[in-house]
Each structure stands twice: as C-alpha cells, then as structure tokens.
Image (spheres, rainbow, N blue to C red):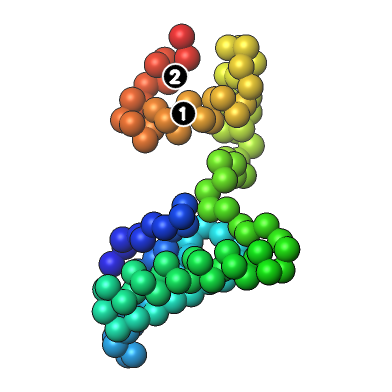
Amino acid sequence: MSQLLEYKGYLGSIEFSPEDEVLHGRLEFIRDLVTYEADDARGLKIAFQEAVDDYLALCASENRKPDEPLKGSFNIRPGRELHRQAMLYARRHGINLNSVVTEALRAYLTGTRSPHRLFP
C-alpha cells in the first residue's frame, strides 16, 4: 500500500505488517517520530487522527513549535555541472536560481517539459 492519510495538514503512511497482522503508519515529512497502529482501516484512520492531536498537544505542553510537513523548501544536490548550467540559465534570463528550480519542477510535474516554455 502506498496511500496517505491527511488530517490538519499532516500526512500519514499506511502499512501492513503480516507478522503482527496489524495496520500501522507514521507521520510523514516531519523530523519527529510519531507512529500509530490499528487492526482495521477505520481504526487506523482514527489512530492517525489521535496521533496528530496527541502530537500537537504534546508540543503545546512543551511550549515548542510542532514540525510542519512540506514547508515549501528543500535542499537539492544536482551535481556541479547541472548546478553550473542552472545558475548560468538564471543569470542569462535575469532570474534567481530558486525560480529556475521552481519552474523546472512545475514544468516536469505538469508534463510541460520544454525548457523554452519555462520562461518567456
């Protein structure tokens, strides 16, 4: 299974353990480890939502900000030559590297992969 649950902006995995015969998962895309499990799908959804609520309550009680999944930034390591090409492309088009990467990802994910369509 590769489905994700979603609740209050948090995403959770769905896995099955044949050895234990239980469904289980964890909150994805955060640094803190938060897990949950149940015997059936309905129970797993409830356990996931309770895990999110418990995580948020724990963070509040410890007076700390909870991790937010997919905050909108990430580091990439494209290699020296691809980095160089992207930086030169950005300079030639009067934009920053972040814009090149953002537009390239958007084009790739929407199927509009022509580099000439990235920027007018």
Residue 56, percent from left and from top: 58, 64
Give above or below for 2 relative to 90: below
As drawn, which residue projects farthest toward the right?
Answer: 63
Quarter of the image with the N terminus is: bottom left
Q: Quadrant of residue 67?
A: bottom right
Question: At label 1, which amino acid type do we have?
Answer: Ala
Q: 42 or 76: which is nearer to us?
A: 42
Mark 2 neighbour density, 10 Å: few (under 14) some (14–19) many (20 or more): some
Does residue 25 appear in this view? no
Q: Inspect the image, locate mark 2, and give the three-letter code of the amino acid beneath it.
A: Leu
The residue at 27%/73% (across/down) is 42
Would you place residue 23 above or below residue 4 in this image?
A: below
Q: Is residue 49 above or below residue 88?
A: below
Q: Nearer the viewer, residue 30 or 51?
A: 51
Q: Which residue is mark 2?
A: 118
Judge by depth and name the residue closer to the eye, 38 or 117.
38
Quick check: 107 left or right of 96?
Answer: left
Determine the image quadrant of residue 89: top right
Residue 35 pos. (x, y %): 48, 74
- Closer to the camera in the image, 80 or 40: 40
- Left or right, 23 with respect to 80, comes to left
Residue 100 spot, x, y in % from top left? 54, 25
At numbered mark 1, what does the secondary structure look like: helix, strand or loop?
helix
- What x and y, as percent, mark residue 7? 42, 58
